[in-house]
């Protein structure tokens, strides 16, 4: 299997794993604040990445190919794409639910392509613009959907805006790191770990000085919520993170991003089965527009 095919496979597996993690995060979000959940998810991910590095016997010498500029790029990518973007994502998820947020997630692809043009100097064709418009229509259609139980129309709009901003920052963060990740001698595990560390440190500092510090501390003690939080963190903070970075390392940024977009379908399926969220006609139309736009951009 060549690197491009490997990257595309990793991107597709990311979509499945992340969709399942999103459902678990939604279940956790009913009792855990976004900042606490993000910090917990990242901490579990760092621990598992550290264990992986020990198992494969990868030491600090494996990072000698990275320059100080590379370290700074990965750090900025982590702060923007993990510390800020993931927290905004959980805030949005709590407001709009998995179904609508999955549709909003479709903005990730166009943002990734836009930033690929800015950072990587990739070019856009007419079909890219057509695909972006279709995805935007899908998001607008979803914004007219009936709010989840207990939520207001205003919360729905705020959630969609937060979710869109989260996707922009997520896409910008990973595309910004693409030149470093693409280096043949860039160690995948170390690059993923460095990004996650950079995204976790600001959260830990903020959590230590915030009024939620006692609530956050309680989350790190074994409780019943761990039955959902731990699997969600393993899937979202470790496995999906590793697969996602691998997809961007080995495949073109725009292709990896659009394959990631298939998580919409898996998330809606998992949400219908596990969370009993209704799959309405409006959601169906929104998904058709969003996925149709994604397919157009893939073949462009």
Image (cartoon, rainbow, N blue to C red):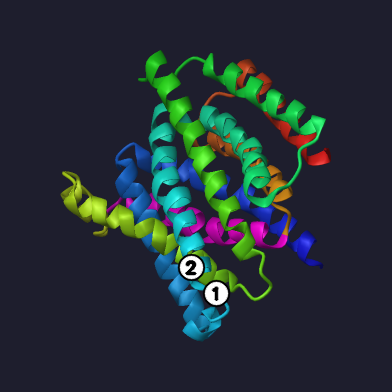
Residue 39 appears in the figure: yes
Q: Position of residue 53 (x, y in %)?
A: 50, 78
The answer to whether the residue labelled 1 contacts the one labelled 2, judged by CB atoms less than 8 Å apart, is yes
Q: Position of residue 89 (x, y in %)?
A: 44, 39
Q: Nearer the viewer, residue 119 or 93?
A: 119
Q: Position of residue 187 (x, y in %)?
A: 59, 74
**Residue carrying label 2:** 71
Residue 148 appears in the figure: no
| Residue sitting at x 46%, y 26% | 161
Task: Say whether residue 257 is left or right of residue 71.
Answer: right
Residue 242 part of the magenta-drawn span: yes
For the residue labelled by badge 2, is the local secondary structure a helix, a strand or a loop? helix
Q: CA distance from mark 1 to mark 2?
A: 7 Å
Which image quarter is the N terminus in?
bottom right
Q: Residue 197, relative to residue 63: is it above or below? A: above
Q: Residue 265, relative to residue 58: is it above or below? A: above
| Residue sitting at x 28%, y 57% | 204
**Residue carrying label 1:** 66
Q: Which mark is residue 58?
A: none
Task: Say whether residue 251 is left or right of residue 144.
Answer: right
Q: Nearer the viewer, residue 23 or 157?
A: 157
Label located before the other in sequence (1 or 2)? 1
Residue 221 part of the magenta-drawn span: no
Magenta stretch, main secondary structure class: helix
Q: Nearer the viewer, residue 290 or 202?
A: 202
Which image quarter is the C terminus in?
top right
Q: Which residues are magenta?
A: 223-250
| Residue sitting at x 34%, y 42% | 34
């Amino acid at each position: 299997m060549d690197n491009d095919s490997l990257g595309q496979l990793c991107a597709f597996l990311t979509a499945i794993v992340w969709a399942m993690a999103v459902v678990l995060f939604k279940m956790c979000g009913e009792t855990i604040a976004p900042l606490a959940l993000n910090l917990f998810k990242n901490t579990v991910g760092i621990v598992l990445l550290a264990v992986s590095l020990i198992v494969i016997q990868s030491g600090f010498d494996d990072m000698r190919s990275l320059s100080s500029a590379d370290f700074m790029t990965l750090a900025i990518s982590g702060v923007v794409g993990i510390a800020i973007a993931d927290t905004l994502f959980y805030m949005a998820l709590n407001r709009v639910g998995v179904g609508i947020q999955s549709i909003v997630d479709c903005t990730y692809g166009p943002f990734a392509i836009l930033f690929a043009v800015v950072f990587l100097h990739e070019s856009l064709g007419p079909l890219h613009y057509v695909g972006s418009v279709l995805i935007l229509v899908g998001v607008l259609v979803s914004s007219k959907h009936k709010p989840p139980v207990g939520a207001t129309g205003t919360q729905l709009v705020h959630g969609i805006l937060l979710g869109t901003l989260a996707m922009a920052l997520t896409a910008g963060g990973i595309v910004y790191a693409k030149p470093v990740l693409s280096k043949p001698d860039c160690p995948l595990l170390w690059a993923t770990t460095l990004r996650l560390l950079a995204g976790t440190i600001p959260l830990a500092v903020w959590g230590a000085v915030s009024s939620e510090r006692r609530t956050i501390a309680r989350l790190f003690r074994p409780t019943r919520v761990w039955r959902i939080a731990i699997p969600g963190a393993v899937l979202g903070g470790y496995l999906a993170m590793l697969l996602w970075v691998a997809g961007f390392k080995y495949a073109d940024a725009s292709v990896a991003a659009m394959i990631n977009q298939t998580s919409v379908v898996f998330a809606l399926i998992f949400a219908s089965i596990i969370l009993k969220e209704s799959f309405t006609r409006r959601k169906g139309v929104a998904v058709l527009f969003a996925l149709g736009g994604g397919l157009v951009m893939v073949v462009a």
